[in-house]
Amino acid sequence: MAQLFDDRVPEHRRRGRGAAVNPAGRHERYATESVDDGWQPDGEAPPLRTTVSVDASRSIIARNSSPDVPFDRSINPYRGCEHGCVYCFARPTHAHLGLSPGLDFETRLVVKPRAAELLDRALRKPGYDCRPIAIGTNTDPYQPIEREHRIMRRVLEVLEAHRHPVTITTKGAAILDDLDILGRMGRAGLARVSVSLTTLDPHVSRAMEPRAAAPGRRIAAIRALARAGVPVGVNIAPVVPGLTCHELEKLMEAGAEAGASFAGWIALRLPMEVAGLFREWLERAFPARAAKIMGRVREMHGGRDYDPAWGRRLSGEGVHAALIARRFEVARARLGLWARAPALRCDLFRPPPRPGDQLALF
């Protein structure tokens, strides 16, 4: 999808953000363009602030039947993500809200304050079939606003009370605020965590994922989770060819040294509006390397910015993708990391009694 990038938000207004533009979503009939009418000089425009609105959904568990993901249900406590990762494959979902996958995705967030209540109700439905719930598969549950809203904390309290298994993927150090619950669930076989690592280079990390936890803090989170008894893995995602792919082994070594027991990797994905946003970012952040990086990306996706085909979208194809996969397997075996995450227990699931419920005889 072609994008025009002559309407960048000035740097002083978007400092700490990943995207520099705010293109209209693909469902919009009209696009807007900023025009200087002389009334407010650019230097006087205020910085972009994060705003939060409330989601009115009446259900919380999303279902999927994708054959190349290892879960069939998930929860997303938030829509949009303040981490601002420019490569985030979830950015196009903001278009469904009538918002831009660009700066809107990072600054106009939606919270689900009834998530725990809706989850408790769903888990109590007759005939509910217990399987692990995945959290963090779309936007990060431990993005900065979690410290204020604590939605993830309340969701975990419900899951622990029901003895329901959960898998979490995050790059947020705020996960350590819930270490008490996760430790208990992890030791009981009810929780595991994957921490996403992209680079050990603080300059690249700050440019590419400006409000996510720094690489060192993520490694510290792996160490703390492992010490608490939580099965924790390192997720090298995304692997950006020509920019971060050379760090693959070092990232795995850092995760293993901190206590990770399993590992995985995912190739850079640029669906829909993300392709244009990533290209604009590359030209701005790494202009001398932009053409080479995009050439490698297209090589891994059959000549396109992104190939959505199941079985190829996560790992890519071609010589470069095969080389990354081989390097990953060699390093995984050398470091003693498991190829698969440990299974979680579903046999412990049992909704807790509520006040006034009749006690079961047996």
Image (cartoon, rainbow, N blue to C red):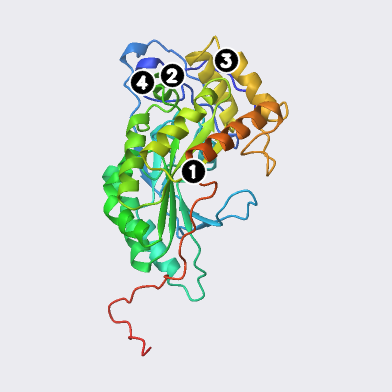
In the rendered view, tell whether residue 183 sits above or below residue 256. below
Give how far apart the Cα atoms at labels 4 and 3 are: 21 Å
Asked if the residues shown at circle 4 and circle 1 are in contact, with their CB atoms under 8 angstroms apart, the answer is: no
Q: Work out which quarter of the rendered image holds the N terminus and state it.
A: top right
Image location (x, y in percent) of residue 252: 47, 34
Label 2 belongs to which residue? 9
Q: Which numbered disc covers residue 290? A: 3
Give amino acid for label 1: Leu
Earlier-in-chain disc, 4 versus 2: 2
- Per the model, the C-alpha gap separating discs 4 and 1 is 38 Å
Q: Residue 234 appears in which quarter of the rendering?
A: top left
> Tag on residue 15?
4
Q: Secondary structure at mark 4?
A: loop
Using the image, determine if residue 224 lies above or below residue 132. Answer: above
Mark 3 neighbour class, 10 Å CA radius: few under 14, some 14 to 19, many 20 or more = some
Give the mark nearest the N terminus, 1 or 2.
2
Q: Position of residue 191 (x, y in %)?
A: 40, 56
Residue 74 place in picture, x, y as percent: 49, 54
Q: Between tags 1 and 2, which lies in front?
A: 1
Q: Which of the two residues, 332 or 2, is positioned nearer the viewer here?
A: 332
The disc placed on residue 329 is none
In the picture, the disc for residue 337 is 1
Dot 3 amino acid type: Ala
In the picture shown, does residue 269 fall above or below 294?
Answer: below
